[in-house]
């Protein structure tokens, strides 16, 4: 087991599947204590149990990032267990098949904005008092779709471009003031359950060639392993075939 993050505390939001789950596993294997949140309690507890079975230290707890009160209660629990949070990874996100502007419903628009954008704000504001000055780090999983227009849908693209606003705005305010770092990771197409929400199914031969969740987790780990003097505001990671 790698021990590069031994002694560090990490909260992974959206850790029940896909890239968030892979981050939880990678950070846990690197020696960090990991607190995993997502809506499905059984799923986050299962990921935590897998990390603990490998000799790591992990806890899973349900949280719905769309509900501010829920997020505050989640971080209250984290605070009770740990004095501080060294790293937050925000990997929660969603999309919908009915994503084209001509069919997008008001309800779906709200849901995507709340999950992909407002949830990130709730979690960032909740973790700020727990991040240590000079070393604290927040990593947001965005998407390549927020850098280059694609067909992922207007609600998805709007929410993810908004995520840049949270990350870059917070960095402007808090990097100089407290030495906190806010990094955005922009992955291309990745083989996770989110692909099941595409309007057209992604064939297995494509899934095999695109990014795997572990590739994105390694990128996040790379950011987390940098010394505090090193700041990586943006990291783009695409599959070669994209
Ligand atoms: N897959 C891709 O091709 C791709 C490419 C670029 C960027 N991304 C982004 O990568 C991030 C991770 O997605 P993924 O591909 O790994 O998909 P995923 O496997 O579907 O993971 C999404 C995660 O978000 C959590 N989540 C969703 N709504 C939530 C809510 N209201 N409250 C708390 N947690 C919530 C899910 O857990 P619960 O369902 O248990 O709540 C799950 O853990 C997303 O932001 C996505 O937009 C994906």
Image: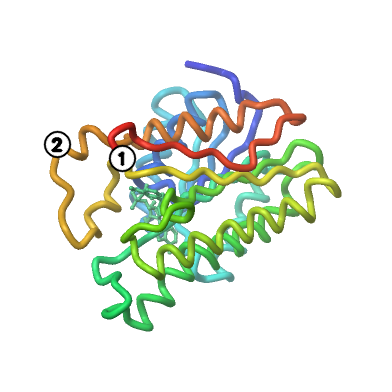
Whole-percent x, y for residue 115 in the image: 46, 65
Nearer to me, 51 or 15: 15
Left or right, residue 162 beside residue 101: right
What count of labels does the image hold?
2
Q: Residue furthest bottom?
A: 106
Whole-percent x, y for residue 122 in the image: 60, 64
Whole-percent x, y for residue 41 in the image: 38, 54
- Tell me: residue 192, above or below residue 149: above
Q: Residue furthest front?
A: 148
Q: CA distance from mark 2 to mark 1?
A: 13 Å
Quarter of the image that includes the C terminus: top left
Q: Residue at x 57, y 70 (%)?
A: 68
Q: Residue at x 49, y 30 (%)?
A: 28
Quadrant of the image occupied by residue 192: top left
Left or right, residue 200 beside residue 235: left
What residue would you read off at disc 1? 242
Q: Residues within 10 Å of mark 1 (few under 14, many from 20)?
A: few
Nearer to me, 129 or 207: 207
Q: How is the image coloured?
A: rainbow
Quadrant of the image occupied by residue 181: top right
What residue would you read off at disc 2? 205
Marking on residue 74: none
Q: Residue at x 47, y 49 (%)?
A: 91
Q: Secondary structure at mark 1?
A: loop
Reading the chain from its start, which is encountered first: label 2 or label 1? 2
- Tell me: residue 172, above or below residue 231: below
Q: Residues within 10 Å of mark 2 (few under 14, many from 20)?
A: few
Q: Secondary structure at mark 2?
A: helix
Foreground label between 2 and 1: 1
Q: Residue at x 35, y 57 (%)?
A: 150
Left or right, residue 53 beside residue 133: left
């Amino acid at each position: 087991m790698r021990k590069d993050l031994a002694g560090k505390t990490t909260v992974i939001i959206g850790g029940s599947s896909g890239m968030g789950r892979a981050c939880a596993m990678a950070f846990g294997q690197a020696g960090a204590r990991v607190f995993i949140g997502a809506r499905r309690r059984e799923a986050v507890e299962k990921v935590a149990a897998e990390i603990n079975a490998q000799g790591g230290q992990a806890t899973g707890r349900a949280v719905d990032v769309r509900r501010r009160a829920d997020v505050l209660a989640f971080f209250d629990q984290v605070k009770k267990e740990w004095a501080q949070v060294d790293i937050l990874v925000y990997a929660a996100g969603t999309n919908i098949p009915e994503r084209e502007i001509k069919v997008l419903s008001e309800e779906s628009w709200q849901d995507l904005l709340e999950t992909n954008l407002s949830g990130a704000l709730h979690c960032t504001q909740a973790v700020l008092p727990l991040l240590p000055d000079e070393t604290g780090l927040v990593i947001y999983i965005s998407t390549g779709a927020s850098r280059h227009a694609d067909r992922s849908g207007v609600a998805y693209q709007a929410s993810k471009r908004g995520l840049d606003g949270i990350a870059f705005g917070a960095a402007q305010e808090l990097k100089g003031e407290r030495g906190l770092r806010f990094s955005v990771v922009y992955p291309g197409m990745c083989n996770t359950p989110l692909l099941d929400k595409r309007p057209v199914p992604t064939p297995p031969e494509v899934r095999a060639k695109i990014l795997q969740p572990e590739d994105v987790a390694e990128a996040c780990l790379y950011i987390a392993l940098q010394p505090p003097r090193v700041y990586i505001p943006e990291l783009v990671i695409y599959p070669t075939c994209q």
